[in-house]
Image (cartoon, grey):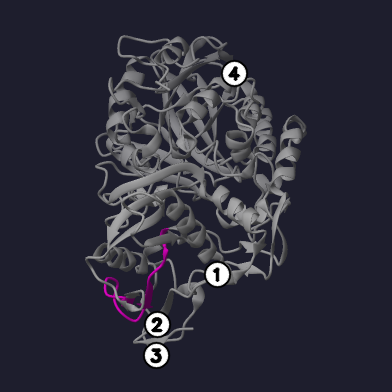
Amino acid sequence: MPLNRRRFLERSAATGAGVALAGGVAAPAAEAHGRGGGHGHRPKRYALTVMGTTDLHGNVFNWDYFKDAEYADDAGNAKGLARVATLIEQVRKEKGRRNTLLLDAGDTIQGTPLTYYFAKVEPITAKGGPKHPMAQAMNAIGYDAVALGNHEFNYGIETLRKFEDQCDFPLLGANAVDAKTLKPAFPPYFMKKFHVPGAPPVKVAVLGLTNPGIAIWDKAYVQGRLKFPGLEEQAAKWVPKLRSMGADVVVVSAHSGSSGTSSYGDQLPYVENAAANVAKQVPGIDAILVGHAHTEIEELLVTNDRTGKTVVLSEPLCYAERLTLFDFELVLEKGRWRVESVKASLRNSNSVPDDERITRLLEDEHAKVVAYVNQVVGTATEKLTTVDARYKDAPIIDLINKVQEDVVRAALAGTEYAALPVLSQASPFSRTSEIPAGEVTIRDLSSLYVYDNTLVAKVMTGAQVRAYLEFSAEYYVRTAAGAAVDVDALTNAGGRPDYNYDYVSGVQYDIDIAQPAGSRIKNLSYGGAPLDDAQRFVFAVNNYRANGGGAFPHVASATEVWSESTEIRTRIAEWVTEKGVLDPKDFASVDWRLTRDGTPVF
């Protein structure tokens, strides 16, 4: 589907520069009260509160679809739009509804079986299709603007555009541009006026920025259609425009963490987690709502390099577990409003009950998805779990690799690549996934593969596979041969997440964790003989890894010989349905083990 530029322009009050004034001026301007009333020589003041959520990932309810139970974690968190809606209403009552703005920093339409169902099973793109549950909930809550996250693109541009049509608020992305014209493909910003009796209105501009990594992670959907330049350069372009248009307050909603790091190595010239860089480098920003990193930052103060002014950053925890509040104090000076102070704070969704309006609104959709994930597709001969899959070759991860190998072999039958041996990679995504003995449901299998990844086949050499395994083995903390082994301290070296550690099936190898990173792979063999560096293999790999996610060596640049759009999770369910019985003897194999100086750790 070509990008619908006409719709974008129709939605926008466009200037010659193609700026989208997305709904701000056309919307009824909010009235607000000034504080101090301007009596005598006291200056007129105004208090504004900007609320923010981020990384909602399809969580409407405080519900775990994978466990078929109320959500619970060790920290006592509660999640979901129904829950955070109560907090939002509390803040509106406290501050005065007309003195508040509600934003989100992206990753909205992917992440739960609820959102998967309405993207794939009963898709919103079907003729006369349903309204997306996230659009329904966020419209009812009254969001003003939402930044695009990278996961907005996981189901393709058609699904994203349909979701956009169903929202009563703009989806912002100043650095999501048309690949040919380089003009914004989505509204870059949103503006709203807050009226103050007896004074000029307070003009608030919200600039939306998304993640450059989309170009890698969802390459199949966006290549040749959209480009994603860096957040810093696009903020430097847009913030002065917003100030010249009279913005008294500039808030950035950025789907980008604050660490200054990137997960994709040097594949892109743009920083993945650039929010603090934007605050440092671009003058004229008052506050940044941070997303993407799934961390909790109540208040981070960053000094702008050019002006010396403080920019306030805040990142609420993902899944609507927290709500950020930016409290602005403004003062009227010489006919213009000036931001006198900004303070950020967090509120916890576990402190309030669900908003029954939202619960009632989506109870039918919720019930439909619960029924879907509880369908029985097979029987397991024994319990399978990921509890120790980070450091032992676990049969439950072998299941993923076996399914991927089978799918790729069938896909390449009759092609020039049919004779090449097939290897496969899979990661221990979850530490709590379990397939019980007895009946197996879609829910059980979905908990094993929580991402909507699809399958790709690449051609790699033995030498490249070796380098790939060495990179993966950096996940382990170096542990001397005589030292005690604490499994909780053994993994995630350098902060590497579990999803960036890979099993590779089809070859056998030891990982010697007593050795320094880069020289840990020992006894690497294929078919019982030492691996030939020149041997060619077909590598079954998920699209995230195939496109460079995790910055694993060689795989992104390797020749691609096949890919598909069916989720790996669906392929696992199909495989189990066809077999009827899930028996480890059909898929389990010991391909690797941890050692120290040649002695097995376990």
User: Which disc, if any, is residue 482?
Assistant: 3
In the rendered image, residue 265, in percent from the top left (x then y), is placed at 28, 52
Query: Residue lying furthest left in this view?
Result: 534
What is the C-alpha distance between the residues marked 1 and 4? 63 Å
Location of mark 1 (residue): 395
What is the C-alpha distance between the residues marked 1 and 3? 29 Å
- Residue sitting at 42 percent across and 60 percent down? 425
Image quarter of the N terminus: top left
- Residue sitting at 77 percent across and 32 percent down? 360
- Considering only vertical position in the picture, is 351 above or below 485? above
Location of mark 4 (residue): 33
In the rendered image, residue 12, in percent from the top left (x then y), is placed at 44, 13
Q: Is residue 554 visible?
A: yes
Q: Circles 1 and 2: CB distance less than 8 Å?
A: no
Q: Which residues are magenta?
A: 500-524
The kind of residue tagged 4 is His
Label 1: element kind = helix
> Of callouts 4 and 2, which one flags the residue occurring earlier in the amino acid sequence?
4
Residue placed most toward the observer, 538 or 221: 538
Depth check, mark 1 against mark 4: the one in front is 1
In the rendered image, residue 276, in percent from the top left (x then y), is placed at 35, 43
Location of mark 2 (residue): 595
> Of callouts 3 and 4, which one flags the residue occurring earlier in the amino acid sequence?
4
The kind of residue tagged 3 is Gly
- Magenta stretch: residue 291 in it? no
Depth check, mark 4 against mark 2: the one in front is 2
Depth check, mark 3 against mark 4: the one in front is 3
- Left-right relation of 224 to 293: left
- Considering only vertical position in the picture, is 478 above or below 221? below
